[in-house]
Image (cartoon, grey):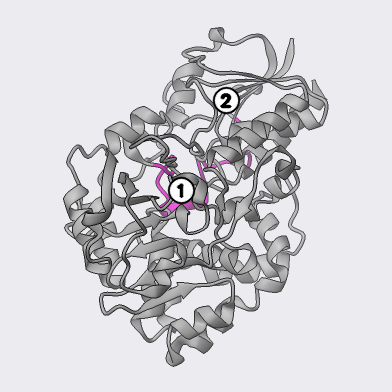
Amino acid sequence: MLDAVVVGAGPNGLTAAVELARRGFSVAVFEARDTVGGGARTEELTLPGFRHDPCSSAHPLGINSPAFRALPLERYGLEWLQPELPMAHPFTDGSAAVLSRSVAETAASFGPRDAGAYRRLVEPFLPKWDTLTRDFMSLPGTALPRDPVTLARFGLVGLPPSTWLTRRFRDEPAKTLFAGLVAHVMAPLSGVATGAIGLVFALAAHARGWPVARGGSQSISDALTAYLKDLDGVVHTDYEVKRLDDLPPARAYIFDTSPTALARIAGFGRYYEGYRYGPGVFKVDYALDGPVPWTAPEARAAGTVQIGADSAEIGTALRDASREGRAPERPFMITVQPGVVDPTRAPEGKHVFWAYGHVPSGWTGDLTGAMERQLERFAPGFRDRVLARATAGPPEIAARNHNYIGGDIGSGAVSGLQTLLRPKLSLSPYSTPHPAIFICSSATPPGPGVHGMSGHNAAKAVWKRLRQT
């Protein structure tokens, strides 16, 4: 009998398997698709030689993850590449605000009236970033806070809505960039703890940047898999699990799946009925004949570029998708251009580029035209660079990854109490009604992102259980 079986070979499932295997437990992973990866994959979606990341591509939480930093992933091929600028937010007049590794450079891009306010916001937390990261990405049940005072100070700043936090800024550049940071998790700007979301992304950039993985996000998943195999773990691909009887006997089962899928497979009935999924995304992957022709020079040097003319436009786009049930006319977009630092992604002189905008859950329309009109506002002539495009709306995204119900790449709405308490109100969110069954997906704390911490935290709960039986 195996000690543990993991269902789903995304970053969280693989991290949970690695953590257990490192401690001497026998582990097997079962993945429905023919390759590992989950939200960290790389595929040729458009033309031969163009390597796209169907989901995540820039990894501020990955390089800062306490779980990943404790693993020897570099020995297994993972190499982080840092763009000159982690992120830029261009404006229609050709200027841009930036999120730089340097606090001073970032503050200066906001203008003199907001530079001091930004420095006062982030500088108290940066010296204690590693401890703070470990504290807010863990739970009291899995690890006691190492610096409860700093964590409490962070909570006082971050728990209110981001609209409260941005009141300290007077001008649009700072307000707009920060609104865009919050929108990375598709959260309405007025939601609880949205200030913390924006602050985490900003601090992550100053601490270690927003890198891409050389060769594509698949490198992260492949490194975790290679390390797991060296620890005598076993990975089975092309193996769909429809019920528990499809799995071999084990002392514990860990699901890197949506709560909906877990309830169906394990026979939990309506146990997760109250869990809410958020809006979907419409994503376009491009093969380009050259770099994106941004008007703002800062955007040409950034790995990630946020698109939204001002904070009001971003707020409207988020409300349209999450509350009004309609696709925005001017979508807020997150875009990533790996080629600014990784020439392996495309043939010489060519580039891969992706962009996504928020749309209602399950939306079946085509946002390509609206997205490209937005891009042309900040990068005139963009359409002339397009060699090929691959589009994916919520139905295609959900079909590609069954955890992304309705096209929700966060595997659950980041709004209301569910921002902090997911997938259930519980002191042990990784546990389920069955004592030998656990959940480790992005539906559990600390939530969305390629960081492995949900798997890391769930593994702690599992090995406590295994030691007791």
What is the magenta segment's predominant secondary structure?
Answer: loop
In what element is the residue under mark 2? loop
Give the quarter of the figure containing the N terminus.
Answer: top right
Q: Is the C-beta separation of discs 2 and 1 under 8 Å?
A: no
Q: Amino acid at mark 1?
A: Gln
Q: Amino acid at mark 2?
A: Pro
* Residue beneath the point at 55% across and 7% down: 245
Position of 12 with respect to 413 (left or right) is: right
Residue 106 visible in the shown view: yes
Observer-nearest of 448 and 370:
370
* Mark identifier at residue 433: 2
The image position of residue 69, as x and y in percent, is 72, 50
Position of 387 with respect to 53 (left or right) is: left
In what element is the residue under mark 1? helix
Circle 1 Cα neighbour tier, 10 Å, few/some/many (<14 / 14–19 / ≥20) = many
Give the farthest residue toward the bottom: 112
Q: Which residue carries the number 1 mark?
A: 418
Residue 383 shown in magenta: no
Give the quarter of the image for residue 393. top left
- In this rendering, is residue 117 above or below 469? below
Give the farthest residue toward the front: 348
Q: Which numbered disc, 2 or 1, marks the residue closer to the eye?
A: 1
Observer-nearest of 376 and 346:
346
Magenta range is 409-431
Quick one: label 2 or label 1, which is nearer the N terminus? Answer: 1
The image position of residue 92, as x and y in percent, is 26, 75
